Amino acid sequence: MKFKETKLTDVGIASDGKIYIEQFDADCEGPTYVFLSLDQFNKIEGWVFKNRDEIELAWNGGVENDNES
């Protein structure tokens, strides 16, 4: 999965089946990874769905709704 308007963040599936988020930062000498089990990802997904309205209000319109992400 590629995020809209950025080349610095990527999401994929590791060889062990974990979901990973890879992000590049100019302050780091290499990419930073966050690995999530399917259960962890599902819990985050549920939390985001449950709190979507609050998250969008807090975001101040920073990202347009885009189904391509």
Image (cartoon, rainbow, N blue to C red):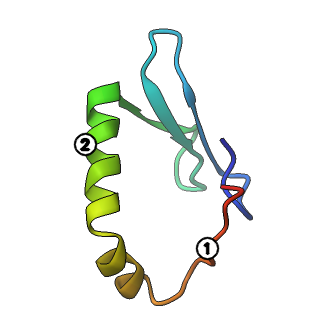
What residue sits 37% from the left and 87% below the top? 57
Q: Can residue 27 be seen at all in this image of the molecule?
A: yes
| Left or right of 43, for residue 28 | right
Location of residue 56 by image quarter:
bottom left
Q: Is residue 56 above or below residue 51?
A: below
Q: Above or below — where is 33 with respect to 61?
A: above
Q: Specify the quadrant that holds the C terminus.
A: bottom right
Using the image, determine if residue 8 lies above or below residue 20. Answer: below
At a point 42% along the width and 21% down the height, the residue shown is: 18
Which part of the image, by quadrant, shows the N terminus?
A: top right
Residue located beneath label 1 in the image? 65
On the image, the x and y values in percent for residue 30 come to 58, 37
**Circle 2: element type:** helix
x, y percentage for residue 43? 25, 42
Position of 43 with respect to 55 (left or right) is: left
Task: Check disc 2 and report the residue beneath it.
Answer: 43
Check disc 1 and report its element: helix, strand or loop: loop
> Pointer 1: residues within 10 angstroms few (<14), some, or many (20+)?
few
Compared across the picture, whether 13 is left or right of 7 comes to: left
The residue lying furthest to the top in this view is 16
Give x and y (percent) for residue 40. 27, 34
